[in-house]
Amino acid sequence: MKKLTFALAAITLAAAAQAYPDKPITIVVPFAAGGPTDKVARDFAEAVRKHLNNGTIVIENVGGAGGTLGANKVAKAAPDGYTLLLHHIGMATSPSLYRNLPFKTLEDFEYLGMINDVPMTLIGRPTLPANTYPELVKWLNDNKGKINLANAGLGAASHLCGLLFQQGVKIDMTTVPYKGTAPAMTDLLGGQVDIMCDQTTNTSGQIESGKVKAYAVTTSKRLTSPALAKLPTLDESGLKGFNLTIWHGLYAPKGTPKAIQDQLNAALQKALKDPEFIKRQEALGAVVVTDGRLAPAEHKKFVAAEIDKLGVAIKAAGQYAD
Ligand code: ASP
């Protein structure tokens, strides 16, 4: 009898996976619409749906608290493959920054594969008098106590970058948190905040059209895209060792059936080979993942290593939830 029950359960699970998806899938983006994570998610959704029976994918923006609100929503969602999370490096910073993180990063999710790596840029409001990185450093020194640094909340990529930057230049700034860097960009363009670090997926267009001041890139090597190649690295500008790249991955609630996880990972891997997707990502300065981190086990291993590595950096920068 027991054997029969097991057999029936296996058949039911297999049938569910075969029919999957038979209704819209929601991908939660833990930041505001129109920002860099949102842009990656919308392009990815378009590419991946072709490999999921051309099903509908809905993007739900759940911004706030540096991405932890959206991540928590998915951690608590039904593990049926219909609610997923597309999140960035914040998966690995939040365990060090939040004393009461409402989910366990390595235990409450199924890891479905990584999507891309994205450099960041340091930009300023269009009316900022500084035009180059050395001029910016001078301006920051001349305006101590009056500098507003925008970010997407504690644990966001912009927060981490801003934290490391303040530590590097040894100047404390007033941080202004937003639900994502899309609304932060609106205020930067309007001159309400002075500077911000943000992914190239959000800044390339603004830099290219000269709408913001651009000072440096956060990677150890200069970028190659025409709009960004002229920017120095922070490392070569005097912040020795500064090297920050933002990565994005896909997650499902813990307990999502293995067959559905496998289906989602296979669809992700196919989507990442889509020439149209690759072209769009490259135009925004992003590099689509082609290495071992496409495999869920490697994705999880990578995040675990990042939690350790970033924990040390965050503690050294003077912020740690203990
Ligand atoms: N770029 C933001 C961050 O700082 C997130 C976003 O709005 O996508 O993490």
Image (cartoon, rainbow, N blue to C red):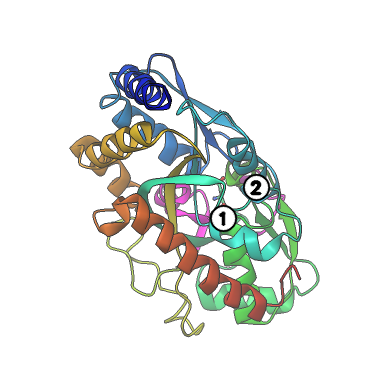
- Label 1, label 2: how far apart the Cα atoms are: 8 Å
- Quadrant containing the C terminus is bottom right
- Residue appearing at x 54%, y 72% in the figure: 308
The location of residue 265, given as percent across then percent down, is: 31, 40
Residues drawn in magenta: 187-214
Name the foreground residue: 246 vs 95.
Answer: 95
Q: Is residue 31 left or right of residue 170?
A: left
Q: Amino acid at mark 1?
A: Gly
Question: Vertically, is 63 above or below 149?
Answer: above
Magenta span contains residue 291: no
- Identify residue for label 2: 68
Q: Amino acid at mark 2?
A: Thr
Question: Vertically, is 267 above or below 15?
Answer: below
- Of mark 1 and mark 2, the one earlier in the sequence is 2
Question: SS class of the residue under badge 2?
Answer: helix
Confirm or reject: label 1 Cβ below 8 Å from ligand 1. yes
- Residue appearing at x 33%, y 21% in the figure: 11
The location of residue 13, given as percent across then percent down, is: 38, 24
- Identify residue for label 1: 90
The reply to whether residue 196 is visible in this rendering is: no
Question: SS class of the residue under badge 1?
Answer: helix
Magenta span contains residue 200: yes
- Residue appearing at x 60%, y 64% in the figure: 160
Tag 1 near tag 2, CB within 8 Å: yes
Question: Vertically, is 48 above or below 227?
Answer: above
- Residue appearing at x 20%, y 41% in the figure: 273
